[in-house]
Amino acid sequence: MTKLSVIIHRASTASFKRFFNNVNIVHKESGRSKPSVLFDMLFCVFRYGIGYLDYNIFGFAFLDREKRKTYVTMKENIELVRRLNKREAYEILDNKLLFNQKFKDFVKRDFMDLRDGFEAFENFLAGKDAFFAKQLDSFGGLGVKKIRLSEHPDRKKLYDELMQSEMYLAEGVIQQHPEMSRPCPQALNTMRITTIVNDKHEAKVLYAILRVGNGKSDIDNVTSGGMYTMLDDEGTVRYPMFCDKTAETYYVHPNNGFEFKGFRVPYFKEALEFCKKAAYVEPDLRYIGWDVGISPDGPVLVEGNNLPGYDMPQNHLFHADGIGMKAVYEAAIQG
């Protein structure tokens, strides 16, 4: 089963508990009765092909039918992946080791396959204080662990444990730009930059999202409790952060008090061009969501995603006019 299939399956089997929790959230925010929200949510699921979480995130309770039509839906996003990315190339993005090998000029850090043996592992560790161990097919921040070598004096035991956990990929730690550590020092705070290579062979950036850790983990993934916001054309934060896991909106970081508005990502323009250049590496993958870290020397690829998020950039917090991004997508595709 491909990563795309797994994500679709998970979306289709989401819990009733989360469904009714979202009904309650929309009820409180909109003032509409729970039955009204429930029936309208179900109507939108079948009429527009969105998920029930999208109903909340897109602010559909406040929109008329014409504005609802301006949103890219889950179904349309999946269809776009299947149109622009050839199935036989999915594995390049689904397998983290293959990704690093294919995009090694953009990854800019050392990595190894632990299946090459313990001696190779010892050589990889030389001069390191820490590294990341990853399962090859993990996503959403799951199956990823930062290993601090001071906590593992027995290297052979560590190696055996990683092999047992099928954490076959070992990667050097990205040195984060000091400015990027300010929102959350505990995590590598990344951007999700999504590109499309259209039929004219032009790479276009659809959106750039800043993701910030919650202060309790080494990663910033939204599914692991991180938060996100849309960046403007200069890489500056103009909107509050949103956390899918808590369904909360944050103007300051809940753990360190950092004020998000006005924060500007260093090397932002360079990061956009960096991703557009990476978009041409594999012709059979034309729609990719890039996770990008910022080092003191510029952008670095963390990984690529075969099913780029359509929901985050369409969060109603970033669209006061209630207009979704379907026109942006169509313009990029048409060139």
Image (cartoon, grey):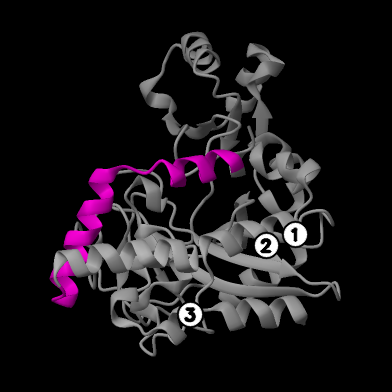
The percent position of residue 112, horizontal first and vertical second, equals 67, 29
User: Foreground residue, 261 or 10?
Assistant: 10
46 within the magenta span: no
Specify the quadrant that holds the C terminus. Answer: bottom right
Determine the CA span between mark 3 and mark 1: 21 Å
The Cα atoms of the two marked residues, 1 and 2, are separated by 5 Å
| Most foreground residue, 238 or 222 | 222
What residue is disc 2 on?
A: 80
The answer to if 25 sits in the magenta stretch is: yes
Q: Say what amino acid the circle numbered 2 marks.
A: Leu
Q: Secondary structure at mark 2?
A: helix
Coordinates of residue 36 in the picture (x, y in percent): 21, 69
Q: Pointers 1 and 2 in contact (CB under 8 A)?
A: yes
The three-letter code of the residue at mark 1 reads Arg
Q: Which mark is residue 83?
A: 1
Q: Of helix, strand and loop, which mostly describes the magenta segment?
A: helix
Q: Position of residue 117 (x, y in %)?
A: 67, 13
Compared with 157, 282 (above or below) is below
Provide the residue span drawn in magenta: 5-32
Of 148 and 291, the residue lying toward us? 291
SS at mark 3 in the image: loop
In front of the other: 31 or 249: 31
Q: Residue at x 51, y 35 (%)?
A: 132
Q: Which residue is mark 3?
A: 324
Upstream in sequence: badge 3 or badge 2? 2
CB under 8 Å between discs 3 and 2: no
Which disc, if any, is residue 72?
Answer: none
Q: Earlier in the sequence, mark 3 or mark 1?
A: 1
